[in-house]
Amino acid sequence: MKLPIYLDNNSTTPMDPRVFEAMKPYFMNVYGNAASRNHAFGWEAEDAVEKAREQVAKIIGASSKEIVFTSGATESDNIAIKGAAEMYERKGNHIITCEIEHKAVLDPCRKLEKKGFEVTYLKPDKYGMVHPEDIEKAITDKTILVSLIMGNNEIGTINPIKEIGAVCRKHNVILHTDATQCVGKVPIDVNKMNIDIMSISAHKMYGPKGVGALYVRRKSPRVKLAGVIDGGGHERGMRSGTLNVPGIVGLGAACEIAMQDMEKDHKRIMELSDKFKTKIFEALDETYINGHPTERLPGNLNISFAYVEGEGLMMGMKDLAVSSGSACTSASLEPSYVLKSLGIGDELAHSSIRFGIGRFTTEEEVDYAVDNVIKAVNHLREMSPLYEMVKDGIDLSKVEWQDHH
Ligand SMILES: *Cc1c(COP(=O)(O)O)cnc(C)c1O
């Protein structure tokens, strides 16, 4: 077993060797520009791009004409939100999203606010879920777009997108969903789920980095987006620029493989994460799972370990590549805005770790990781006077603390 162990599959996934094999010819031998219409070099590249377009469409139940290739989900989110805002500006200026979206959604929304749009940032419930009723209540006659994440990258909660889509349909509002964490992991059908625009990224599903796609519905209703990157009119005017042919081939292959292996992967990853969770919770008390107990991404475990200090915990788990619940800003260690929004206190947020189990995680790695986590937490707790008091049965809420200020 090689150390450190990669348990950060929600940040990015290693590329599947089968994806790399599919991409190889397109770096060297097939180098034509997919937009060159006058010769075989161009046609061959175009054929590869169109095959990939079908592979991407198929895994989400779309038609290939509805797929726009981009540089990744950040760009897809930007095109979806800014493109819809510009296109439907005359219909209204109100957008609905939620507090725990990825920054690739929140930052474009903030920018639009500066341009006169009104954005409602819904607060999710304590599990990080937004409910159809919340959306319905927030819709006004000025609402043009709802943008809601499908599976949250930090806490794993999966939103009821199908029901939210039905509400959006009823009120004639376009629904965009950032499905970056879900595509290839859970079944998605854009028609059954009433999705109008959807962001996809290759590197979260064992494909290459720097390539993604945007699904844009073509009928009932036909959605139009203003171009954000102009210059040549590629991708139906929604995203100009010479296509990244090897990357696109890689995304297509990643979709094809995910479709074949989804059930098998899902079963194996759930077994591993159930084992991980069970062992941790058997060995450690005062440990909490963040996000929804059942409606969550396979393999994502976001866990708070009370009475341990976050940085110390990371130090004690040097063999594990994981993400912490704090974001290192230049000045201070800020607790994650996602955990904060769920009402999790700073202390607990700082002691939160996101474990991401993926297609290539082995059972041996899970066993080693569990052992490491339990040892590190116990070690830190042995040094914590607060934890000693809790173990002695002292109710901390009744303790009168001395004020040091
Ligand atoms: C990773 C991620 C993104 C950004 O995707 P890139 O392809 O890296 O730009 C956006 N949204 C979610 C939910 C993600 O997990």
Image (spheres, rainbow, N blue to C red):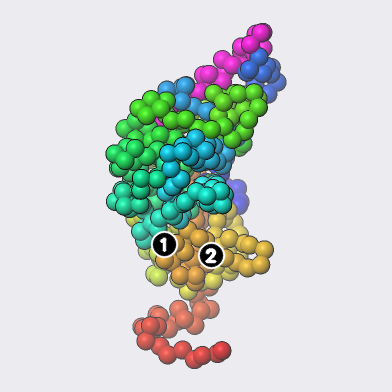
Q: Secondary structure at mark 2?
A: strand
Q: Which residue is mark 1?
A: 342
Q: Quadrant of residue 61?
A: top left
Q: Quadrant of residue 319?
A: bottom right
Image point (38%, 47%), residue name: 158
Q: CA distance from mark 2 to mark 1?
A: 12 Å
Up/down of 104 relative to 235, above or below: below
Q: Residues within 10 Å of mark 1 (few under 14, many from 20)?
A: some
Image point (70%, 20%), residue name: 28
Residue 59 placement (x, y as % from top left): 42, 29
Q: Is residue 126 left or right of residue 251?
A: left
Residue 180 placement (x, y as % from top left): 48, 41
Residue 110 placement (x, y as % from top left): 54, 52
Residue 55 on the magenta span: yes
Magenta span: 37-60
Q: Which residue is mark 2?
A: 335
Ligand 1 within 8 angstroms of badge 2 C-beta: no
Q: Nearer the viewer, residue 169 or 117?
A: 117
Up/down of 171 relative to 37, above or below: below
Residue 263 placement (x, y as % from top left): 37, 35
Q: Looking at the magenta stretch, what is its main secondary structure? A: helix
Q: Given the image, on which type of amino acid does mark 2 rest?
A: Pro
Q: Nearer the viewer, residue 138 or 274?
A: 138
Q: Is residue 209 something one can see in this rendering?
A: yes
State which quarter of the image contains the C terminus: bottom right
* Figure quadrant, ligand 1: top right
Image point (46%, 89%), residue name: 401
